[in-house]
Structures are given as C-alpha cells and as structure tokens.
Image (tube, grey):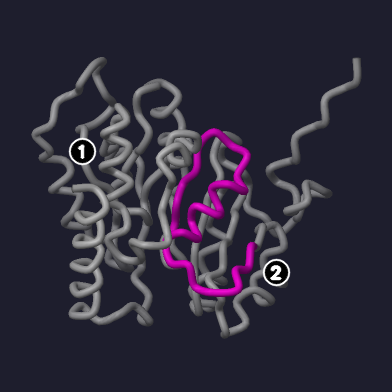
Amino acid sequence: MPEPTPAPDPAGGPDGGRPDPSAPPVEDPRVTVVVASMNRRDELLASLGRHRAPVVLVDNGSSDGTVDAVRAAHPHVEVVPLPANRGAAARTVGVRRARTPYVAFADDDSWWAPGSLRTAADALDANPTVAVVQASVLVGPQERPDPFDEVLAGSPLGARTAPLPGPRVLGFVACAVAVRRDAFLAVGGFDDVVRFPGEEERVAWDLTSAGWDLVHLPAAVVHHHPSPRRHSPARRVRAITRSAVLTGVLRL
C-alpha cells in the first residue's frame, strides 16, 4: 500500500516546500487566513506579517504593484491574482484554495490577535452545529470596541439545540470572522452579485436556513485599523443599501 502524500508544512512556502524564515509562527494548523484586497499594497505589507496562520491573498486586479510587492516581502503567502475585481467573491476563491477545516477572514487592514485563531478553532471543534464564529473587534490605534459588538452581544436569539459558546446571531462582519470551510462552500460562499460592503447578509441567511448556528465569541479578538483609502461614509451607506436590496431580491 503506497504511503500517503504528506500534507504541506503550514509554515512552509505556498508550494509546501522549505519553511520560509520570514513567516510568523503558525498558531493553529486548523485555520487558514484568507484576505481579499485591491490597490492597498501598503496596508497589506504591514498587516500580512501579523497573521499567525497560512495565508491566501486573493488580489482583485490591483494596479499598484500589490502582487509583486507581496511576493517579494512575504514569500510564505499564497498569492492568487485575479484578472479583474470580483469583490467579495474573491474570498470564496481563497476558501477553495484552503486545505484546513476552518478559514478566518481578514481584510488588508485587519488581523487576528495572538491566541484568537486557536480560540475560534476550539469553539468550532467543540460545537459541530456552529459554522461561523464572529470575533470582537478593536478599532484603530486607540483599540476602541466596535459598536457592532454590543449589538451582537445583546442578541435575543437562544440556542436551537445544545448550548453555544456565545450568543447566537444572524449576521457577522467578514473582516473578523472564522467559518467552517465546508459549510461556507456548501451555501455558495460570497458571490459576484452582492459586493463589498454588506456582502455578509446573504451568506448568514443561507447558513441559518441550512440549520447552522452563527455565534459571537468575545474571547476571540480582531484588530481593525481602517484604511485611509476606505470609501467615504456616504459612499459606504449607498453600497450597503445596494447590497441589502440585492440580498432581498435574491432571497425574499
């Protein structure tokens, strides 16, 4: 009987070869971090070294030299360049490339605090009905709690079956969430119709409809330092409204 092919070393390069000395230590082999980005080279170069996990970066057709810069500065990162901007669907491309049972999403301006990837993976291991673990978010250098955390913590939804590790919720913020890979892909992941921002709602609905639980786990922490290249608040409101309308058309 032939010997099975060894799995790639999570601390190695993207081809599973010799470990890359520039890679940060892998905190938990159960998790891959997936990042989607476009034209935010400087933010990526600063944040990618903070991820204590194998990283898949899906580039949405950047024109600022992101792909070459990341490959040079972070050779441990698997870079998947797309020919055009696919929005949130780029994350789904990254999830398909992952070979771990769980995937943690991060934006180019966010990263998981030390120990939090393991905390999220432990919660997913211990709770087989849970498909999504939403971390708490600390915003900016001042580490301000994201107001959405308070909304999630106050969720009135009770557990549908066994007790859960945190409040059951019907939404999440994609820059600070860990998902069960197979469950995420089974509902189609993020698509090419509902783009950034507000792309989470349709996925949350579909996972809940399929019988999965989504939970808020305050013990897992993500740092988010919003990029100065972020769209204006007015433009974000318009985009979120567009996403909500499209989600309603698709699912109501």
Tell me how many marks there are: 2
Q: Is residue 144 left or right of residue 223?
A: left
Q: Position of residue 204 (x, y in %)?
A: 29, 43
Q: Is residue 160 above or below residue 206?
A: above
The tag earlier along the polypeptide, 2 or 1, is 2
Disc 2/disc 1 C-alpha distance (Å):
37 Å
Q: Residues within 10 Å of mark 1 (few under 14, many from 20)?
A: many
Q: Is residue 179 above or below residue 227?
A: above
Horizontal side, residue 18 vs residue 109: left or right: right
Closest to the observer: 67 or 201? 201
Q: Residue furthest right?
A: 2
Which residue is at 82% across, 48% downward? 17
Residue 203 spot, x, y in % from top left: 33, 46
Instruction: State whether residue 26 is above or below residue 13.
Output: above
Kind of residue at disc 2: Arg
Residue drawn at point x = 21 percent, y = 38 percent: 169
**Residue to which mark 1 is pinned:** 169
Give the position of the N terminus as an image quadrant: top right
- For the record, the magenta segment spans 80-106
Of circles 2 and 1, the one toward us is: 1
Q: Residue furthest bottom?
A: 64
Q: Does the magenta segment cover residue 90?
A: yes
SS at badge 2 = helix
Left/right placement of residue 82 relative to residue 245 reads: right
Q: Position of residue 101 (x, y in %)?
A: 54, 33
Disc 2 target residue: 71
Quarter where residue 245 is shown = bottom left
Q: Residues within 10 Å of mark 2 (few under 14, many from 20)?
A: some
Three-letter amino acid code of the residue under disc 1? Val
